[in-house]
């Protein structure tokens, strides 16, 4: 695909008919002309490489295609993930701690692959081709998982049901190998796909246009909503049938969902807006560090005397907006000092000795985001408990509801999804209008304030989980039987975590997309996924460490094979303590943070994120 940038725009005085997502937020600052031109003004092009026409590309219809496709992908992903811990216990005969650790590692791998997908997208392939490639890989992984379950794992057919009436035979070595190959192939596919589709969706809205920028504010809420709507089907219907031993059917349903999602994504090809890959961002960052080191003995001059390129050689020709100089990390400014040697080099300047202000500010931007990003990892540790310890806690409770109706423990995540869906609409249509009256912020509160609120709500959710576990243990009648306490008592902890996601994860997507330079937009989206990844790995290490330490001297540990002999509530309380410490650091780093400043939007984007 020949995607090139364009700079020439034709201004018109009539409004085009393109529609975008509506938002209940008050109008943003009218710092630019609200009358749109025929073409987009952010450098995007159509699939033929021509300047993107505002009326026929992007906007609400194109974003809707991406959202439906994304929902189908997540239906498939959660169709595998929701009962994977139960599958490993019943079919692969793994213990609780082992299964929980694997789920954390597997989910972490899903999101760590997002960094690789973001790198390919930003540097070489672009969002569209990256999405297509990783969707195909995801499809291949699900086909392998379906076949391996059919022929080597689920023996006899429909074994591993919730009533233990048909126990599975020990899996063959080939079956176990195929299980790990297929699950990690799916992890690679969905992980590489997610940051690219998030950024491609944001690309459908032109930041230079007030109406489209307002729509972009709402996009990430609907993006996360699509994720949860897709997973709702998996957490209800698929989890119900898989709990009855219909594992193979569940995996094939996920496979078909990916095939349909890929087909729908391809059908939208003529309508997408594309951004040209801007080259290897790692090279651009490395050049700044090398150039600054070479000039480490020089004293940086005022910002206006630093090197920047104008005209045809400017980075804006490649669709990269210039960044204004900032006073933080002044040591990196040395990379943009023009020495006598650089001056006499003319146009043949060595990029490893002289960088532009925009390049330097890109590095400053990424470095300033790292402390805040690290503070989101503990939240992801709490989030991942829904797929591991929450499920194990639920299986040790009474799952029979309303007579003979059985609620699989994994299906309790429906309360999380329901909470997310309700919270998204409540946030956009009630909270934002009310908050904006007091804060004068069109978004209601800043992204950092939104993320901090999510940290507090998640903390309360873990406290609720600990309280439920205390009462569950008190009501245990026989150590070898589940507690008669109803699994519905888990609903508050799931709903609190769901509400916290709306604040934390949507806030992260919006914050990192807005606060990263144009050359690293996919990287910004991947930071949210990477946070989830490291949270899962951290959860795995915590479970292993807690199990190892608390099982010493022949004592029952906190997380045991039979939770009736353990103290899972202590693990939840440990997370509460860590969350309090994490929130304190997050508040400190948030008050120190200064927002990114794009040239031409100095008055429109407020640097106050405290």
Image (tube, grey):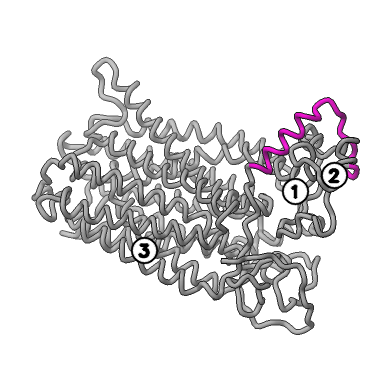
- On the question of residue 21 being in view, the answer is no
**Gap in angstroms between the C-alphas marked 1 and 3:** 42 Å
Identify the residue under disc 1: 608
Lateral position of residue 471 relative to residue 538, left or right: left
Crowding near the residue tagged with mark 1, few <14, some 14–19, many ≥20 C-alpha atoms within 10 Å: few
Q: Kindly check if marks 3 and 2 are in contact, taking CB atoms under 8 A apart as contact.
A: no
Q: Quadrant of the N terminus?
A: bottom right
Question: Could you tell me residue 68's position as x and y percent?
Answer: 45, 69
Residue at the spot x=23%, y=17% of the render? 554
Element at badge 1? loop
**Gap in angstroms between the C-alphas marked 1 and 2:** 27 Å
Q: Which mark is residue 258?
A: 3
| Extent of the magenta region | 283-305
Indicate whether residue 304 is drawn in magenta: yes
Q: Main secondary structure of the magenta part?
A: helix
Which mark lies nearer to you, 1 or 3? 3
Compared with 462, 520 (above or below) is: below
Crowding near the residue tagged with mark 2, few <14, some 14–19, many ≥20 C-alpha atoms within 10 Å: some
Which mark lies nearer to you, 3 or 2? 2
Element at badge 3? helix
Residue at the spot x=71%, y=58% of the render? 318
Q: Earlier in the sequence, mark 1 or mark 3?
A: 3
Q: Which mark is residue 177?
A: none
Question: Could you tell me residue 224's position as x and y percent?
Answer: 49, 59
- On the question of residue 234 being in view, the answer is yes
């Amino acid at each position: 695909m020949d995607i090139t940038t364009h700079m020439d725009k034709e201004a018109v005085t009539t409004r085009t008919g393109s529609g975008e997502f509506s938002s209940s937020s008050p109008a943003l600052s009218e710092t630019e002309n609200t009358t749109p031109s025929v073409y987009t003004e952010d450098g995007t092009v159509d699939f033929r490489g021509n300047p993107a026409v505002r009326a026929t590309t992007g906007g609400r219809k194109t974003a809707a295609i991406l959202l439906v496709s994304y929902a189908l992908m997540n239906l498939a992903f959660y169709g595998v993930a929701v009962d994977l811990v139960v599958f490993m216990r019943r079919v692969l005969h793994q213990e609780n701690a082992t299964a929980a650790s694997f789920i954390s590692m597997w989910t972490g791998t899903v999101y760590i692959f997002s960094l690789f997908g973001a790198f390919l997208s930003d540097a070489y392939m672009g969002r569209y081709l990256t999405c297509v490639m990783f969707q195909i890989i995801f499809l291949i992984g699900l086909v392998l998982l379906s076949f391996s379950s059919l022929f080597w794992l689920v023996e006899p057919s429909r074994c591993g049901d919730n009533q233990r009436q048909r126990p599975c035979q020990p899996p063959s070595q080939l079956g176990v190998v195929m299980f790990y190959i297929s699950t990690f192939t799916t992890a690679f596919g969905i992980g590489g796909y997610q940051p690219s589709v998030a950024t491609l969706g944001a690309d459908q809205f032109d930041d230079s246009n007030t109406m489209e920028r307002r729509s972009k504010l709402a996009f990430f809420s609907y993006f996360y909503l699509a994720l949860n709507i897709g997973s709702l089907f998996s957490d209800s219907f698929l989890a119900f049938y898989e709990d009855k031993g219909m594992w193979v059917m569940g995996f094939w349903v996920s496979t078909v969902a990916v095939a349909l999602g890929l087909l729908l994504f391809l059908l939208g090809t003529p309508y997408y807006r594309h951004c040209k890959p801007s080259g290897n961002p790692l090279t651009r960052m490395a050049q700044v560090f090398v150039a600054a080191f070479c000039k480490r003995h020089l004293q940086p001059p005022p910002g206006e005397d630093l090197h920047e390129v104008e005209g045809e050689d400017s980075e804006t020709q490649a669709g990269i907006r210039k960044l204004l100089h900032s006073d933080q990390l002044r040591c990196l400014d040395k990379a943009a000092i023009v020495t006598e040697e650089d001056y006499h080099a003319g146009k043949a300047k060595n990029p490893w000795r002289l960088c532009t202000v925009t390049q330097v500010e890109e590095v400053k931007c990424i470095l300033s985001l790292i402390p805040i990003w690290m503070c989101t990892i503990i939240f992801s540790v709490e989030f991942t408990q829904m797929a591991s310890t929450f499920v194990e806690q639920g299986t040790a409770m009474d799952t029979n509801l309303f007579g003979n109706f059985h609620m699989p423990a994994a299906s309790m995540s429906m309360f999380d999804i329901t909470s997310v869906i309700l919270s998204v609409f409540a946030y956009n249509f009630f909270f934002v209008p009310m908050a904006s009256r007091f804060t004068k912020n069109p978004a209601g509160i800043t992204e950092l304030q939104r993320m901090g609120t999510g940290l507090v709500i998640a903390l309360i959710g873990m406290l609720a989980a600990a309280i439920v576990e205390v009462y569950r243990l008190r009501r245990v009648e026989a150590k070898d039987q589940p507690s008669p306490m109803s699994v519905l008592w888990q609903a508050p902890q799931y709903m609190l975590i769901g509400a916290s996601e709306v604040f934390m994860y949507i806030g992260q997507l919006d914050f990192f997309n807005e606060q990263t330079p144009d050359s690293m937009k996919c990287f910004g989206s991947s930071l949210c996924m990477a946070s989830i990844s490291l949270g899962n790995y951290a959860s795995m290490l915590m479970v292993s460490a807690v199990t190892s330490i608390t099982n010493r001297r022949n004592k029952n540990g906190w997380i045991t094979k039979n939770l009736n002999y353990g103290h899972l509530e202590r693990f939840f309380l440990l997370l509460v303590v860590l969350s309090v410490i994490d929130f304190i650091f997050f508040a400190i780093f948030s008050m120190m943070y200064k927002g990114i400043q794009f040239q031409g939007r100095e008055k429109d984007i407020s640097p106050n994120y405290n």
